[in-house]
Image: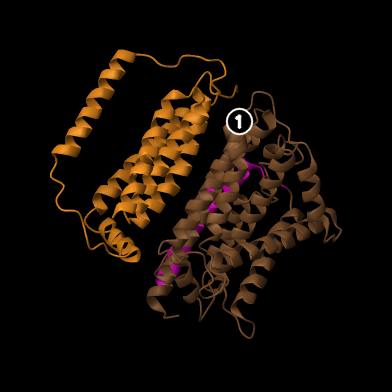
Amino acid sequence: MIVPMIFLVFFGGAAVWFGVVVFRTHSMVRSALALLFSQTAVGLMFLVMQAEFLGVLQIMMMATEMSVMAIFMVMFMMDPGGLGAMDMTHQKRLSLWAGGIGLGAALAVIWLADWGPAGTDIPGAAQQTEDLGRELLGRSMLIFQSAGLTILTAMVAATMVAIAPAKEQPK
Amino acid sequence: MTVLTVLLSLAAGAYLIAVLEGWAVHGRLQPARPVISALALLGRESLLARKPDRLFFEVGPVLLLVAGLLAVAVIPLAPGLIVTDLATGALFLNAALAYVLVALIMAGWGPNGAYGMIGGWRFLGQFVAYAMLVVMPITAVALRAESLSTVDIVMSQSALWNIAYQPLGFALFIAAAMGLCWLPPLDLPTAPGDLAGGIEAEYTGVRLAVLRLARMVVILALAGATVTFYLGGWLGPWLPAWAWSGIKILIVAGLMVSTGRLVPRVREARYLELSWKLGIPLALINIFVVGVIALVVEI
């Protein structure tokens, strides 16, 4: 019990630390990849907690998503490399309050919620994958399908907005 | 012991593939060439570009090597000869290879050079093309095996290899694998013709040696994945299991590094178009067909 706990604390600490790095660096690529490694650390926490499928999935998805995000950040920011030492922060007071309240709310949920007893008989990794598949194609199917459709609609809309309207050909 | 055996066979495989690639590129078979190249690289000065992102510059090649090695860890070479037989092995392979992208972006961004940066971001474009075509054919393979474990996937092919059971998936997977290890005709990140080496442009000496070695490991990992998923892994008559794995992986890797050079380089816009408009519908058809066969016939 003690060894998984040490690893859990270590990866949890790494996730928080990389999260802090996201905001401390001036380089957009470093910022995006710091967020990636923060999420990878969360994936490793899943692995420590014996949720093998979820952990591996998290580690895989985040690598690709954050890399794609990195190029968008480079495209849209004025000083992507951070070499110009531009200050890109704004509304500091508001964000401090919003962050503080968010942190307080998260801590309140963690401490006040009744989480029930910790699971002791954890099914094997193969069984977990099967259970997850049955859950996704059963009770949770409607939720995931509607989420998927919403994301697809947003993607199509974003692409349409991004495409410059073609100039009319002179006749 | 298993780890050591796998690492030694990996080293031997990388050496042979390097000789083969040299043969394909220069037209001369020189068995000593990789040693000479490696010694030359190790002896050379390791230059550092001006104002680099030092962290990314140093981590890029090493992360690539780590990603390749992690991918190799779930490839079975014989019954029992696998570093770790995970229940989610096929997914883990994808997860490890996803970091090839991260490593190349780091290696491209790190040296603060135009060619490298374009090479790195080009690989991201290439990734958007190949990503779904790596995952979707594997879905069909796992569908037949009813497991994500690579050992179970090999065992599921004892009656009929997947190359015959789902040839469409095999073709799509190979096309995606060539993109993943940026081999010609999909070598846009390095593109010797127009990018002066791309991601390799600013690397010299020891760092370049690590980058090239890591690329060999990634190629071998993908050849191993192809053999595991489609060519029956270690299965085969007469010879011992490990020999079959070795022969098949070397043949696949050899074909991967040599045949692509016979066709002209594909632009990433074209690759993206082909992958999304043709590849993904075909991959969906493949999953459907495999599902129907699995339900109807017992093979």
Determine the residue positioned at 57% across, 55% down. B69
Is B219 magenta? The answer is: no
Residue B230: % across, % down: 55, 69
All told, the count of numbered labels is 1
User: Does residue B158 sit above or below B10 in this rendering?
Assistant: below
Is B280 magenta? The answer is: yes
Q: Is residue B121 visible?
A: no
Determine the residue positioned at 60% across, 80% down. B236
- Picture quarter containing residue A114? top left
Determine the residue positioned at 68% across, 63% down. B13
Q: Is residue B4 visible?
A: yes
Is residue B299 found left or right of B233 in the rendered image?
left
Give the amino acid type for the residue marked by disc 1 in the picture.
Arg
Q: Give chain B's shade.
A: brown
Residue B266: % across, % down: 67, 46
Residue stretch in magenta: B265-292
Mark 1, residue position:
B54
Q: Quadrant of the N terminus of chain A?
A: bottom left
Residue B68: % across, % down: 58, 53
Q: Quadrant of the C terminus of chain A?
A: top right
Residue B88: % across, % down: 41, 61
Is residue B151 found left or right of A106 in the rendered image?
right
Q: In the image, which lettered chain appears orange? A: A
Q: Residues within 10 Å of mark 1 (few under 14, many from 20)?
A: some
User: Which element carries disc 1, helix, strand or loop?
Assistant: helix
Q: Nearer the viewer, residue B60 or B275?
A: B60
User: Does residue B200 sit above or below A75 in this rendering?
Assistant: below
> Which secondary structure dominates the residues rendered in magenta?
helix
User: Does residue A46 sit above or below B200 in this rendering?
Assistant: below
Q: Nearer the viewer, residue B161 or B152?
A: B152
Q: Chain of mark 1?
A: B
